[in-house]
Image (cartoon, grey):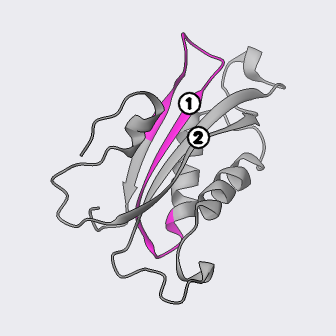
């Protein structure tokens, strides 16, 4: 597997995975969001980057070229937007957990990696990345 730098590092997966799964992804989605625990973060929005990689069960695929047959990157984007539409959330960790849980509601997804970056805090970007498997390791 090629090693990458910057935002693309989310795409790296272990080369020792027992099952190779197809993946869908959204990289560097930037939204104005209401989040943060500090007083200066309340009542404002800040730019937040979202990158998501979802591993798809090996038995899922398009047989008749119909979008309904496969999970879509639109599903990933919609999960982010629906969580952020709930209003102010204090912790990026909470946001990541909610996004992962929403994506894993689709039984065709076997694991998800969610990276959230607060783009207006810190030296460049600060945030969190979580990986949540359904039980299968991809």
> Residue furthest toward the top?
123
The residue depicted at 58 percent of the width and 60 percent of the height is 73
Q: Which comes before the other along the chain, label 2 or label 1?
A: 2
The residue depicted at 66 percent of the width and 18 percent of the height is 120
Spot occupied by residue 83 in the image (x, y as percentages of width and height): 68, 51
The residue depicted at 53 percent of the width and 43 percent of the height is 51
Instruction: Tell whether position 74 is magenta.
Output: no
Label 2's element? Answer: strand
Residue topped by disc 2: 50
Q: Is residue 94 above or below residue 101?
A: above
Residue topped by disc 1: 117
> Residue furthest toward the right?
43
Badges 2 and 1: C-beta atoms under 8 Å apart?
yes
Query: Disc 2 to disc 1, how far (Cα)?
Result: 7 Å
Q: Quadrant of residue 50?
A: top right
Count of marks placed on residues: 2
Which disc is residue 52 wearing? none
Label 1's element? Answer: strand
Q: Please state, as top left, top right, bottom left or bottom right, where the C terminus lies in the image.
A: bottom left
**Mark 2 neighbour class, 10 Å CA radius: few under 14, some 14 to 19, many 20 or more:** many
Judged left or right of residue 15, residue 127 is right
Spot occupied by residue 61 in the image (x, y as percentages of width and height): 44, 80
Spot occupied by residue 94 in the image (x, y as percentages of width and height): 56, 42
**Mark 1 neighbour class, 10 Å CA radius: few under 14, some 14 to 19, many 20 or more:** many
Q: Which of 80 and 11 is in front in this view?
A: 11
Spot occupied by residue 20 in the image (x, y as percentages of width and height): 26, 65
Q: Quadrant of residue 41?
A: top right
Q: Quadrant of residue 105?
A: bottom right
Query: Bounds of the magenta span?
Result: 104-129
Instruction: Tell whether position 116 is magenta.
Output: yes
Judged left or right of residue 1, residue 114 is right
Judged left or right of residue 75, residue 19 is left
């Amino acid at each position: 597997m090629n090693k990458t730098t910057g935002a693309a590092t989310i795409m790296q997966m272990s080369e020792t995975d027992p099952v190779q799964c197809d993946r869908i992804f959204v990289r560097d989605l930037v939204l104005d969001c209401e989040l943060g625990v500090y007083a200066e973060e309340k009542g404002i929005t800040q730019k937040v980057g979202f990158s998501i990689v979802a591993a798809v069960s090996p038995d899922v695929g398009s047989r008749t070229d119909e979008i309904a047959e496969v999970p879509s990157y639109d599903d990933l984007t919609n999960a982010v937007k629906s969580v952020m539409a709930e209003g102010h959330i204090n912790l990026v960790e909470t946001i990541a957990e909610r996004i992962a849980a929403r994506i894993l509601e689709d039984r065709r997804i076997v694991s998800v990696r969610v990276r959230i970056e607060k783009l207006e805090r810190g030296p460049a970007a600060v945030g969190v990345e979580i990986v949540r498997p359904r039980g299968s390791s991809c």
